[in-house]
Image (cartoon, rainbow, N blue to C red):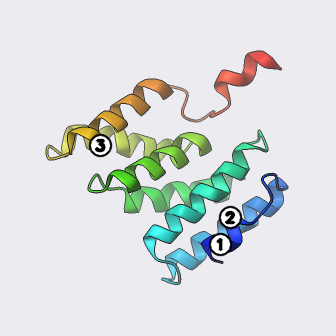
Amino acid sequence: MNLEEIENLPDVLPTETLALMFQNVLNEFNIGKIEEKDFLLILSQLTDRQVMTYELLESEVRDGTDKTLCRIWNTDSYDDVDIILSIVVNLGLKNCFQKIKDSINQDRDIDELILKEIIDTIDEVGENISNPYHGLEGFK
């Protein structure tokens, strides 16, 4: 699975198809077939399509994504932080969100721009991380 294939997918896909694609990319990353940068870009593309389903990603795949992003979370790269924040918020990944919140107190050498991005995201999400569709519930 490569980024170009993912970018050429339709904007809307069935949730079952997306769950399989997420699982596939997680597997490929975990065995070293995909570089971290490509992995994040592919996950971002899949997340954009998952959001369009207005459903939560299948829980086992969501948990695997959460664990993997926790493992690779770092505050060294603005691009990585930006992508991971987007994925975490849009998929409702609680564990990684907690790790992100903890990192602002543990890592004193965070670049100001990165720190601002993290704090703004935490403020925006509040306590609603496990339900990325929280703001839409009033429109049912």
Q: Name the side, left or right, on which 54 lies relative to 69.
A: right
The residue tagged 1 is 4
Total of numbered circles in the picture?
3
- Contact, mark 1 vs mark 2 (Cβ under 8 Å): yes
Q: Amino acid at mark 3?
A: Ile
The residue tagged 3 is 114
Label 1 CA crowd tier, 10 Å (few <14, some 14–19, many 20+): few
Q: Is residue 50 above or below residue 131?
A: below
Which of these two is toward me, 132 or 120? Answer: 120
Q: Disc 2 on helix, strand or loop? A: helix
Q: Disc 1 on helix, strand or loop? A: helix
Across and down, in percent, residue 116 comes to 30, 34
Across and down, in percent, residue 131 comes to 63, 33
Q: Disc 3 on helix, strand or loop? A: helix
Q: Is residue 15 above or below residue 38?
A: above
Residue at 52% x, 68% y is: 39
